Image: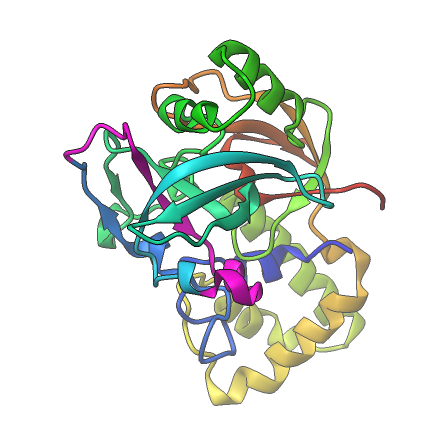
Amino acid sequence: MIDSWYKLADHFCARRASIGHKKNDYFEQFSIRRYNYAQTGDTKSVRLIFLGATADNPVNKTLVRNGRFIWCKNLAYEGTNEEGFRQISFTIGNGKKRFIVPENLILCLPSSIYVNNNGFMRHYDKIFSSFSSVFRYEKALRLMLRTSDYSDLEEFVNQVETDSPYKTGTLVKPRLGYFMPNREKLTKKMHDLILEYCRQNFCSDKFQDLLRVLTHYQGSIVPTDDKELVDSFFEWCETYSLSDHPYGIILGKYRETSNYAGRELYRVSFGGTIYEKVHPVQLEVVSEI
C-alpha cells in the first residue's frame, strides 16, 4: 500500500501540526534543530541521531532523545536484518550494553558537518540531504573495520556496499513522515484532486474553500466550518486511487556524494519526477506491489 500525496505532505516530520489535527505524530525534533561542528576527529566514536521509530523496540527506547545526537563507540557491522537493512551495534559512554539498530533508523552526524534546520534556514527539501549515513562515512567504517573479520578497508566497504538494499533499479516508495513531495507537483495534484472531489460530490461551490485550506502546508488549523468538509475529502482520498503518490525507481547515487562527508544520497524517479538528493531513510524498499 502506498500513501496519498497529501498524507505524505501532511505528516512530514518537520511539521508540528497536521491539517485538521492538533499534533503530527510523525514530527521529529531533529528536523528543526541546529547541529554545530564537534572538536573530536571521530577516531573513537561518532555522533548518531535515532529516528522516533527506534523506540518501537523497547530495548532501544532510550536511544530516542528528542533530536539530540548520541556519541556511539565500539561500532560493529551486524550484517542485514530480516527486512534487508544493514545493521550496526555499538555501546554508549562507559556502558557495556550493546545496542543493535538498522540503517533506516539512523542519521549520522560527522564532526566536520554543520547542519542548520532551524527557523528561516529550514527548507523541507534539504532537511535530510545535510545528514550522512553511517555506512557511507569513512571514519565510521574504519571503526567498524576494527571489530570485523576484515583487515582491508576496501574489501570491507565492498561487502557493506553489496549488502545495501538501495541499489540502482530498486523499486521504492516514499516513507511516510520523512518524504515531502515536490512542492510544485503537490500543489498541482491537490488542485486536480479537489476539483475531482467537488465534481463527484456535487459541491463545486466548496472548491475554493478546500483549495485554500489544503494548499497551505505550514500546519495551519482547519477552521471549524471547514473541518467536516476536509475530513470528508481525506476519506475520499483513501478510496480514490489517483490520489496515491507513485512508486519510484532508484536511478543511482547522487553525483556529489563522498566518503569524507559520508553523505549517501540517491537520484530517484517518482512517476517521471526526478528527486536529486534523497537520503535512504526517506525511502521504503518495495519487494512486491
Q: Is residue 219 above or below residue 182?
A: below
- Quarter of the rendering containing residue 261: top left
- Quarter of the rendering containing residue 195: bottom right
Does 52 lie within the magenta span?
yes
- Quarter of the rendering containing residue 161: top right
Residue 14 % position (x, y): 40, 58
Q: Residue at x 14, y 34 (%)?
A: 39
Most extreme residue toward the front is 96
166 or 83: which is nearer to us? 83
Q: How is the image coloured?
A: rainbow
Q: Is residue 31 above or below residue 212?
A: above
Residue 153 % position (x, y): 47, 13
Q: Is the N terminus in the top left, top right, bottom left or bottom right quadrant?
A: bottom right
Residue 286 % position (x, y): 76, 42
Q: Is residue 284 above or below residue 270?
A: below
203 or 269: which is nearer to us? 269
Does 155 lie within the magenta span?
no
Most extreme residue toward the left is 39
Please indicate whether residue 261 sits to the left or right of residue 206 in the image.
Answer: left
Q: Which residues are magenta?
A: 39-61
Please indicate whether residue 283 sits to the left or right of residue 286 in the image.
Answer: left
Q: Residue at x 49, y 60 (%)?
A: 60
Residue 94 % position (x, y): 29, 51
The total number of labels drawn is: 0
* Residue 114 appears in view: yes
109 or 281: which is nearer to us? 109
Q: Residue at x 32, y 37 (%)?
A: 46
Please indicate whether residue 194 sits to the left or right of residue 287 in the image.
Answer: left
* Residue 181 appears in view: no
Q: Residue at x 40, y 52 (%)?
A: 96
